[in-house]
Amino acid sequence: FYQTPLLTPLLQKWLPSRFQEVVGVQHLKVFIGDEDIILSGANLSDQYFTNRQDRYVQFRGCPGLTDWYARLVTAVCRFSYPMCPRRIGFLLPLATSIDPTGNPSGFKAFARDQLLPLLSPMPPNPMDADLDTWVFPTIQLGPVQITHDEEVTSYVVFKCSEDAGDNLYMASPYFNIAGCYLPLLLASHSKGNLHVITAHPKANGFYGASGIAGHIPSLYLLMAQEFLQAVTDAAQAHRVALCEFARKGWTFHAKGLWFSPSRHECGGQGSQVALTTIGSSNWGERSCVRDLE
């Protein structure tokens, strides 16, 4: 059970447990079995198997990739609370004895030390020369100054909108674009098309919730309107479109980027996806600054 070092004793005492996730959560969704792995943005609750639109990408027979993610999960476990197998919801003491609430600076240093080795470049494999697809894992944990995913995503966003005819698609159910990405998406040099896909208020997972949570879909609608205003202010409306997913009885939870280069770049065959990102980031400030992605 991961607990963010940003959850101070005061927040822990006064912030209701259902809202503590806004401070920061462990947001990885990784499913490993032998040499196969599924990467997703989905959780394992019932609605994901019935009426919630999400993404699941399976890689089969990839021992190098599964080993890397197994190392990532093991590293996260080292700075997370073990769950007691005989008492559901009861947490055992941290193996490191470094409490994220009582000693946040020590916890951050330890967590960073566990994750940094995973960012070391791997030596090239001569067997890879004949393959046509590369998989490049990234990590993000803002509180410990690991911004690997943010740096890679920023580069992709910047480079994938330079040429006319390029198409970049961005999906997030909770669209609240982070300040580090917005200038890149709306840069004056950009010539390619940007398509944003988000949830219609009725397809938002909080639609119909009781209390304050029931107002969250309206809040994201306001953020979408602010984004469109920023598009207009940047004189980029001719190349940016925002669409809402709406399907009766369904909610939307899919996240990702897709890049389709111009016809010239892909040998005259347009509409081919040359790059995609898979994961749980919503491209918002929380994903960049607070969550483990």
Image: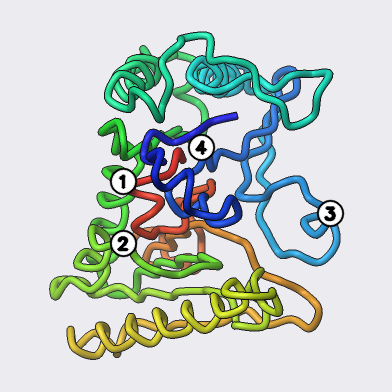
Nearer to us: label 2 or label 4: 2
Position of residue 119 measured from the top left corner of the image (x, y, whole percent): 34, 22
Mark 2: few/some/many CA within 10 Å (<14, 14-19, 20+): some
| Picture residue at 55% right of the left edge, 67% below the top | 173
Height in image: 238 above or below 204? below
Q: Is residue 273 left or right of residue 34?
A: left
| Picture residue at 47% right of the left edge, 59% below the top | 258
Nearer to us: label 2 or label 1: 2
Position of residue 44 measured from the top left corner of the image (x, y, whole percent): 76, 45
Q: Is residue 120 visible?
A: no
Nearer to us: label 4 or label 3: 3
Q: Residue furthest left?
A: 188
Looking at the figure, which quarter contains the N terminus?
Answer: top right
Q: Read off the residue under disc 1.
A: 150
Query: Which amino acid lies under the numbered mark 4 shown in the image of this protein?
Result: Thr
Q: Is residue 202 left or right of residue 97?
A: right
Cα–Cα gap, marks 2 and 3? 30 Å
Residue 189: quadrant of the picture: bottom left
Nearer to us: label 3 or label 1: 3
Q: Read off the residue under disc 3.
A: 46
Query: Which amino acid lies under the numbered mark 3 shown in the image of this protein?
Result: Asp
Nearer to the camera, 19 or 255: 19
Q: Earlier in the sequence, mark 2 or mark 4?
A: 4
Residue 177: quadrant of the picture: bottom left
Q: Read off the residue under disc 2.
A: 178
Verify CB contact (< 8 Å) between mark 2 and mark 1: yes
Query: Which amino acid lies under the numbered mark 2 shown in the image of this protein?
Result: Ala
Mark 1: few/some/many CA within 10 Å (<14, 14-19, 20+): many
Q: Earlier in the sequence, mark 2 or mark 3?
A: 3
Q: Is residue 188 left or right of residue 40?
A: left
Position of residue 136 measured from the top left corner of the image (x, y, whole percent): 44, 34
